[in-house]
Image (spheres, rainbow, N blue to C red):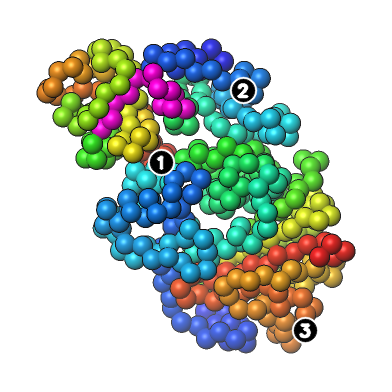
Amino acid sequence: MSRKEFFVNRYRELGWEYEPVCPKQAIRINTMNAKESDVVERLWCRGVKLEEVPFVDSGYWVCQSKFSVGATAEYLLGLYSIQEAAAQIPVSLFTRLQNKTVLDACAAPGGKTVQLANLMHNSGAIIALDVGKRLIALTNHLERCRVKNTIVYLMDARQASRLKLKFDRVLLDVPCSGNLTSGPDWFKMRTKEDIERNAAVQREILTEAVKTLKDDGEIVYSTCSLEPEEDELNIDWAIKNLNLQTVKIDCYGEKGVTSVFGEELDTGVENCRRIWPGQTQGFFVCKLGKRECV
Amino acid sequence: MDAIKDFASRFNTNLRLNQNFIIKKENRYFLLNPRLKKLVSEDFFHAGVYLGKAKDGKFFPSFSLLAMIAEKEDANKVVVNEMTEWFFICGRDVFRQGIVNVAGSKRVGDHTLVLNQHGECLGFGKIVQNLDEEKGRVAVWNVSDVGDFLRREH
């Protein structure tokens, strides 16, 4: 069996019939820097045709453009970010972000960090962590988009408790195996071992995040992986081992799968959202809180 | 912190930032707010608003600092038309014909901010032709522009 067949069979078991897809490019307008309608009009005048993404605020699909939307004056001035539509969902799930202390544990290249700052109106504080050269991309993004409320540390998310801070909100957009929309070679490049290794790292990050979360805090966990080991199985594990509970969310996507390859998961996993590739890339998102507080 | 004050004075304005909230990390300067000042620890990589860096006796401003200076009414500024805006962010100099408005100094040798017609700061340059003259060739040399964000990526 080829690797592609291996993955396609798994998706079929989870309820999705594979088909090649090419999601549309999307942008998100940084309303802290400009009025949304003004930016849409300015881009329209440049010949960029946009269509509102129905399931996120200030998100637009790029339907037509004669040039890269990453090379306009509006982009360089931080009036919008290029951010895939499904990737705009996680930050939108937090409640009452203004003036909060927020951990963005795997922050680079910073699309979601900027989105957080935007929804916080640059109030409160974001602590953004990541490792390696990715920090340069992150800080460039923060500077371009005029983010003022963020402190960045060169730190592995698995060491976050060293900060000795407690957070109201924790974003875990964890490193993952990606999905088939990232390119034609995805199937060739991924193995089950990769997925299991990533899933183990993700559990370590979840474990560390819980140590930093205030009792009434919120965690949003997301991946762009379609593999249940990194998604529903990790959330099931967190419910059973980290005293966490899922929170119902009202957003785009299908309910999390509670029967995975013959294993029955906690019913709370249903509160997760699984997004099969189509209009967007493949994605998984879940909101969690400490059990006694949910 | 004098580096920042001195840099702003090149545009004939006085930028007063609260010194208690400016922190230096190696050769880089950052402006914090009280909340961040309370939270930040010494080993940070980036914090608050990046202001710029000092290197070999020169100060290299961030675009956030330039935007702050541009908010000062008395700062030297030129406003450019849409075509010149595009050329400028591609790293080109500004021709006199592309300037639609001048505020502050028009003297050769002075520095000036370059703004688009929405009042957004695109970067800065050095005046190389008296801006009172209606025509001519290059009027403002490009020293730094926001197209740098793209050039950094490559």
How crowded pointer 2 is (Cα within 10 Å; few <14, some 14-19, many 20+) is rated as some
Camera-near label (1 vs 3) is: 1
Is there a contact, CB below 8 Å, between mark 1 and mark 3? no
Question: Over which residues does the magenta segment extend?
Answer: B68-80
Question: What is the distance, in whole Å, between disc 2 and disc 1 at their CAs?
Answer: 24 Å
The residue that disc 3 covers is A264
Question: What is the distance, in whole Å, between disc 1 and disc 3 at their CAs?
Answer: 49 Å
Q: Position of residue A125 (x, y in %)?
A: 67, 41
Q: Is residue A169 magenta?
A: no
Q: Quadrant of the C terminus of chain B?
A: top left
The residue that disc 2 covers is B22
Q: What's the residue at 31%, 36% (across, down)?
A: B116
Report if residue A188 is visible in the image: no
Residue A287 marker? none
Q: Is residue B75 magenta?
A: yes
How crowded pointer 1 is (Cα within 10 Å; few <14, some 14-19, many 20+) is rated as many
Q: Report the chain holding disc 3.
A: A
Give SS at disc 1: loop
Q: Position of residue A98 (x, y in %)?
A: 65, 47
* Left or right of A245, for residue A71: left
The residue that disc 1 covers is A77
Looking at the rendered structure, the kind of residue marked 2 is Ile
